[in-house]
Amino acid sequence: MKKRYLVLSDGTVFEGYAFGADKTAIGELIFNTNAVGYIETLTDPTYYGQIVLQTFPMIGNYGIIESDFIGETKLSGYVVREWCQAPSNFRCEYDIDKFLKDKGVPGIYGVDTRELTYILRENGSTNAIICDEVPASLDEVKNYKIVGAVENTGSQEVSVYLPKTEIKKHIALVDLGSSKNLEVTLMDKGYKVTVVPYNFKAEDVLALGADGVILTEGPGDPKDYMSIAEEIKGLFGKLPMFGMGLGHQLMALSQGADTYKLSYGHHGSNQPAKIAGTARSLVISQNHGYVVCKDSIKKGEVSYYSVNDGTVEGIAYKADKAFSVQFEPTDEIIAEFLKGMEE
């Protein structure tokens, strides 16, 4: 039981014990409210540059199952109240400690995650460091900023996925740092999918002859990627388009709207989003720290909003056959895009 420390940028120190990789890590500390699904959290590239705190007190009870991985591990550190050293599940391959070691991610357990979550909710997300010795200076922690998020998670080259059946339609999927399962899902439904790099040009996407465009989720501050927003602007109205997460934010920026950073973000699979103009809500998975400013929207109408804080969760651009959502889309929402594209 090696001592390890989580030190916040304001100097607050939480003492715990080490597991995972034997290294120091700095990142933006955020909390995730999932009760299950820690494997998906650990392999979600949109956590790039962040130290993830799990609010659920016991993590790792069903071990690590590689077939449940959704992408590459990009988080900087991991914080839990207790990690299960004897996982029990017939699918379990190894424990969470080995996973973190293999991925080079330091973890800390035995800390008061309820107190930490309270601090983040009251004061907002903060930078922090996981270390074996409390540093004399916290300047590096205070000055930390997530940079190169999309560059380090998004696709670097064009890839083509062909269905085994007759091709229904052709979709251009702009990968901004998403988990690697949407293209497979679309391929299995009979669609040809061309994965486009994050640094695409609008004319190159149009030259593919695709029937529609999907902009994926991704990490980072959307305003760091105004060049991508400009390329999206060149696609508007020319092809049916659907954006999610970062893709949603960049679509809004391309149409003159603004974005801002939330105090502590929405991170978890139990986030409620209300469908505008109805009494219906969805409980969906979200992982984002930025949102579109409602008052800045010049084009399109808000289609979803957060039940918790009223922030924008979706925008419909009906005249341009485009729409977007801030969250992980449901099968119903994906089907809505596919139907609109085929019509």
Image (cartoon, grey):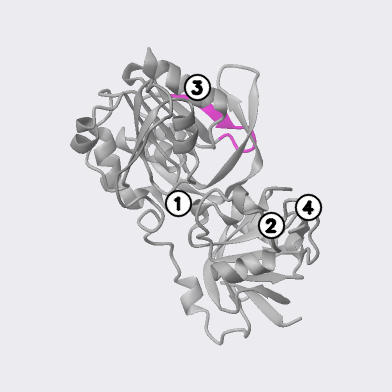
Using the rendered view, name the quadrant where residue 194 is placed: top left
**Hey, what amino acid is under mark 2?**
Gln
Residue for badge 2: 54
Question: Which of marks 1 and 2 precedes in the sequence?
Answer: 2
Which of the two marks, 4 or 1, is nearer to us in this view? 4
Q: Is 48 drawn above or below residue 1 in the view shown?
A: above
Whole-percent x and y of residue 108?
68, 71
Task: Give the number of the mark in front: 3 or 1.
Answer: 3
The answer to which of marks 3 and 4 sits earlier in the sequence is: 4
Mark 4 residue type = Asn
Q: Which residue is mark 3?
A: 335
Magenta segment range?
A: 301-310
Q: Count the numbered circles shown.
A: 4
Quick one: quadrant of the N terminus? Answer: bottom right
SS under mark 1: loop
- Closer to the N terminus: mark 3 or mark 1? 1
Up the image or down, 239 lies above or below 113; here it is above
Q: Are marks 3 and 1 in contact (CB under 8 Å)?
A: no
